[in-house]
Image (cartoon, rainbow, N blue to C red):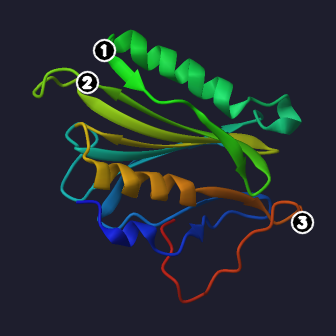
Amino acid sequence: MIGAALLALATASTAPSGEKLIQPPAPGFVSVLKVDKGANAVEQFVPEKQSLTKWTDMITVQRFAGQGTDGGGRDPATWLEGWGRTFAAACPKAQHGPIGRGAVNNYPAAILAIQCAVGAEDPKRESVFLRAIQGKDAFYVVQFAMRRIPRRPEVELVDRYLQAVSLCDDRDARHPCPVLDAAAPRNR
């Protein structure tokens, strides 16, 4: 379902000057929810022929305005720790690895994988992989959820997808935006 094409050339969203979240295209996925309230936004994508309520894989992209470094900021690893506690409260059998801390294009970032390993038919059975990035203007989270415990090749593919998620700012040379080929397909 998740093809190797996920690793295609990443493209930046077509936002005006400023911070731009960069994410790889997700072939076969369609937008099923898009809410943009000023600078805060959420968009969710699922495989074609699936819906917001009936899905097997979902990509969620969130932007929290005013929560970048200019607004006091959020530490990505601390945010993911809190998210993980909330997830574990809903799934006492939750399992997760360590939070990966680092930087993305000179922005603080973190990554987390967590699973709710309950019975095979339980609707709570879910695996979630997240990347959080603290920008200057906003805080960004990209989440890839699966309603199953994935096999290693799927985990590796999702990891590469999230590692390709980045943030740039065409106003700041410390966070350069990629030069995009005008002929390349764009996902947003």
Determine the residue positioned at 65% across, 30% down: 77
Most foreground residue, 107 or 187: 107
| Residue under pointer 1 | 93
State the separation of the CA atoms marked 1 and 2. Answer: 6 Å
From this viewpoint, which residue is outermost toward the left? 121
Image location of residue 96, percent across then percent down: 43, 27
For the question of whether residue 134 can be seen, the reply is: no
| Residue under pointer 3 | 173
Circle 1/circle 2 CB separation < 8 Å? yes
Looking at the rendered image, the quarter that the N terminus falls into is bottom left
Question: Is 56 placed above or below 125 here?
Answer: below
Comes first in the chain, label 2 or label 3: 2
For the question of whether residue 75 can be seen, the reply is: yes
Comes first in the chain, label 1 or label 3: 1
Image side of residue 14 versus residue 2, left or right? right
Q: Callout 1, which amino acid?
A: Lys
Determine the residue positioned at 19% across, 40% down: 54
Most foreground residue, 35 or 137: 137
| Residue under pointer 2 | 117
State the separation of the CA atoms marked 2 and 3. Answer: 44 Å
Task: Answer with the quarter of the image where residue 165 lies.
Answer: bottom right
Task: Answer with the quarter of the image where residue 182 lies.
Answer: bottom right
Circle 1/circle 3 CB separation < 8 Å? no
Determine the residue positioned at 57% across, 32% down: 99
Comes first in the chain, label 1 or label 2: 1
Image location of residue 55, percent across then percent down: 23, 43
Q: Which mark is residue 9?
A: none
Determine the residue positioned at 45% across, 52% down: 159
Q: Callout 3, which amino acid?
A: Ala
State the separation of the CA atoms marked 1 and 3. Answer: 45 Å
Residue count near mark 3 (Cα–Cα under 10 Å), binned few <14, some 14–19, many ≥20: few
